[in-house]
Image (cartoon, rainbow, N blue to C red):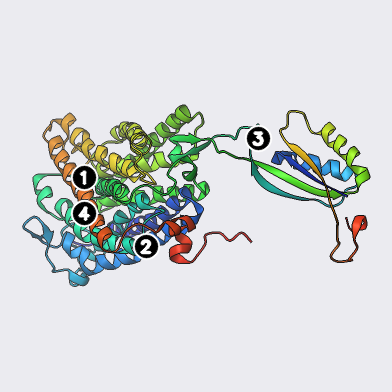
Amino acid sequence: MAIDTGDTTWMLISTGLVFLMTPALGFFEAGLIRLKNSLSVIMQTMTGMALLSTLWFIVGFTLVFAPDVNGIIGDLQWFFFNNVPYNDSVVWAPTIPGVNFATYQMMFAVITPLLITGAFAERMKWNAFFIFIIVWSLVIYYPLAHWIWGGGWLAKIGVFDFAGGIVIHTSAGMAALASALVLGRRKGFGPEIMVPHNLPLAAIGATLLWIGWFGFNAGSALASGALAASALLATQIGACTCALVWILLSWKRTGKPTVSAAINGAISGLAGVTPTAGFITGQWAFVLGIVLGFASYYGIVLIKERLKIDDVLDVSSVHGITGIVGSLWIGLFATQAINPIGPNGWLYGNPMQLPIQALGVGVGALMGFVGTFVILKILDYTIGIRAKEEEEDLGLDISYHQEVAYENK
Amino acid sequence: MKKIEIIIPDRELQTVGAVLKDNNIGGMSHYRVQGKGISKAEPVSIGRGTMQYTPEFVPRTKIEIVVKDDVVDKLVNNLLDTLSDKIGGKIFITEAQEAIDIRTKARGESAI
């Protein structure tokens, strides 16, 4: 099909917007943790950008989106980006250049493994992090993305995931839970180490994530036009109602409404609306945001407070639980009035979509949790994954990067 | 010579500074300290606004001055009159053995 310049314009912009989310994630995380480790998470996101873009260029794109081999993985015809058309489209996005589609998807492959950094922040060894994100991409993200987006076996069954609720948020969220369990709690786990060191920086990060998410979700229409506009609306209203629920819950539970609740509520809403943004109406996104708010807030209360699992930035709730809820939401409230090539949910006469979505979520959660658990255990027995006690005391910034965030001079 | 240490809430720094000025005391140092006593710290939000935590220590400002013996009583009385009795804080007075001005090499009271 002919390249459409309007579609291409929007997709080039969306590529930039999704790119922005990775450094934004670094700022968000850095602000919410302690000063002495704030550079280490920025370093992980910056290095991840370089490393995972390279990996995607060499082998990632072809494994995910090249023609399917037995429903499991793509073949190698686009190895090293060879033969990816720049003046013609690929089957996944018929009106934009193939290289634009491939580069847009690169940004997703970059941010997904880096979401997990929020769980192992403040105590993961640098070299273990470096190897972990490579292995995680090859073993978990590429296959799972192929299964759902690249025409693999889950796609053939009819699992839908608009912009990555299963592929990205469920898998990374459950990986976060596994990471927190394998690594163990930070030294001195307790309230006094959980005071954010720079909330304005976290708020800047959250704001940049939010605007980046318009490229993430509305860009997943892979074209400009009605579907992109509808997905953008769903993204905005879902984020807002979720943030409102968080503000009110924190107000009620801790006596005062807090900035950290407002920004985490927004991110929870954005993550949860991701899988379903291109399948539901704005009205159902409004309701979804409210459900996501309660689910993610009390998810943190359960995982962090009651079970005392030290998922530092609560990735398991903010991305994992919300990703699961949003992916199941498709089975309930999706409508072909919004997206003719998407499914109908239960409310629109198709009750069978819900178990299909549940299967997809189950596979994504299992891959994310078990896969991560095994990878980290192997790394732990070989090179070790946890920083030494004195490195943790000194802070990872000095221990691994010989830099400090702010010099008090 | 006496060294006077005044520990007060941060917001009272200006008040104390004005009293010192009225008593013709030209030099002072101040810094932020963390301490505990009768006052309870304000709770802070932690863990994404899902929890709160009351820190063990309270932030305070500590002012240090060294003055001639004969001004101590009037100064302390002025401070106590000016600072409200609702303010938690302490004043400590100790003997200062020697004072030396680095530039003029002067010693004793003429150095302060």
Disc 1 marks which residue? A365
Relative to A135, say whether A220 is above or below.
above
Give the label, 3 or 1, closer to the camera.
3
Disc 3 marks which residue? B37
Of residues B64 and A258, the one drawn nearer to the viewer in this rendering: B64
Whether residue A340 appears in this view of the structure is: no
Classed neighbour count for the residue bearing mark 4: other residues with Cα under 10 Å, few (<14), some (14–19), many (≥20): few
Q: CA distance from mark 1 to mark 4?
A: 14 Å
Q: CA distance from mark 2 to mark 1?
A: 26 Å
Q: Amino acid at mark 3?
A: Gly
Cβ atoms at labels 3 and 2 below 8 Å apart: no
Q: Amino acid at mark 2?
A: Trp
Disc 2 marks which residue? A126
Q: Amino acid at mark 1?
A: Ala
Q: CA distance from mark 3 to mark 1?
A: 50 Å
- Residue at x-position 44% and y-position 40%: B47
Instruction: Tell me the element at label 1.
Output: helix
Residue B44 relative to residue A285: left or right: right
Identify the mark nearer the N-term, 1 or 4: 1
Label disc, if present, on residue A374 of the rendered structure: 4
Q: CA distance from mark 4 to mark 2?
A: 19 Å
Instruction: Tell me the element at label 2.
Output: helix
Q: Residue B74 appears in which quarter of the rendering?
A: top right
